[in-house]
Image: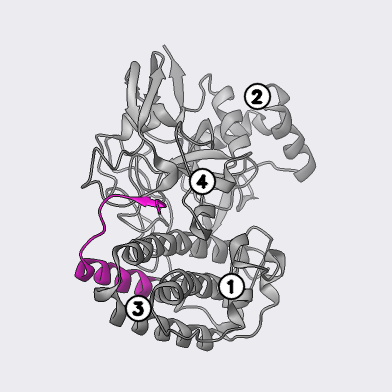
Amino acid sequence: MRTETGSVPASSALGAKFHRTRALSEALVRPLSDADATLQSMDDASPAKWHLAHTTWFFETFVLRDHLPGYALFDARWPFLFNSYYEAEGLRHARPRRGMLSRPALDEILAWRAHVDAALADALPDLPPAAQALALLGCNHEEQHQELLLTDILHHFSVNPLEPAVWQGAPKVPVAMPGPIGWIAGLEGLVAVGIAPTERPDAGFSFDCEGPRHQALLAPHAIADRTVTNGEWAGFIADGGYRDSRHWLSDGWAWVQKEGVEAPLYWRREGEGWTRFGLDGRRPVDPAAPVTHVSFFEADAYASWAGARLPTEFEWEAAAAAHDPAGGNQLDAAGPVEPRPAAGGPAFFGDVWEWTGSAYRPYPGFRPAAGAVGEYNGKFMSGQFVLRGSSCATPRGHSRASYRNFFYPHQRWQFTGVRLAKDL
């Protein structure tokens, strides 16, 4: 089984990570009512209650059921409700109808989590290495769902005419606008990219799609020393960027026309300016903060308008390799969660995921793992684009330079932003 790479930590360290991860998920939903946690505002998003349940199903199914003799499922009916896309695990409740699951209630889901947590904590020291590896995968899987949980809650609340805040935002302090974008000369020629567990046994966790390590050829280029700001994006809007087909890919232009898109998701024109909706409610757009909630189509059009392009994922990885992936504005606890103005210096992690111009496809030599967990990443390598870095909603320590996030080019409910590149 190779759904993750690197050495499995000692059971005590793994147990600590497991408890931290599970506790953070529950902290994130603490401000929600049962009704809040049941909402599903669109097919791409899932109810908060479902995220709590699905991550629990993952541990119960792939670790406890498969590796703990005599373990009995908490409720044999629930796997049908909370399997996501694992065909090997059989039929499941339709994704667009997850919001119809008023039962089990949030309290019942939390009781299930407590049951599974106790069983796994007791079993963890004696589990075989393969099961411990699956538990580590489960922790990283839940960290992914913590970010999805936050971005899904944001979308759920955005369709409520009251635009309720999940939590109170931090006081706004005026920040000077950053100076013009600076350019960092990128590496040229053959560079090593991706993860190689046999060469780096101390590399820690990584997902299977981050490897195998291989060489990529980089042409002369430069990459921006920061991401695009809201103020710069407002200039794109004011210059008619959303109305000028010259900057758009054909599919992007069709999307803009069909959906009537004229600004990033959650922006609204208020008089002469713009406001945005966030987890702290509706507030004026901060011109110094990184722009976010933009699609690949929008990112590519902005780059064209700016006389630049999006970086390839390997240009981005080569530039980010020397930077601390645990730095920057990332998720540490519940609220406030939003991109913040740069504190100075190049930052490749935190605030917003950064669109690249690279399609999400397998690396040379990629092989999915055997069994159901092999469906984790490989089956989605079609029609999506890679994002790199991490966002303000990414749990700190979850990402790294080789991490490959991926979404369809029209999707923008995640904290997605733009870093430019150019040819030299």
User: Element at badge 2?
Assistant: helix
* First-in-chain label (1 vs 4): 1
* First-in-chain label (1 vs 2): 1
Residue toward you, 415 or 163:
415
- Using the image, determine if residue 126 lies above or below residue 390: below
Q: Which residues are drawn in magenta?
A: 1-24
View extreme (front): residue: 69
Image spot of residue 391 (x, y percent): 41, 50
Q: Specify few, some or many for label 3: CA neighbours under 10 Å numbering under 14, 14-19, or 20 or more.
A: many
Residue toward you, 121 or 324:
121
Residue for badge 3: 120
Residue for badge 1: 82
- At label 4, the amino acid type is Thr
Q: CA distance from mark 3 to mark 1?
A: 19 Å
Residue 247 is tagged as 2
Q: Is residue 57 left or right of residue 155?
A: left
* First-in-chain label (4 vs 2): 2
Residue 20 makes an appearance in the image: yes
Image spot of residue 332 (x, y percent): 32, 62
At a point 40% along the width and 26% down the height, the residue shown is: 315
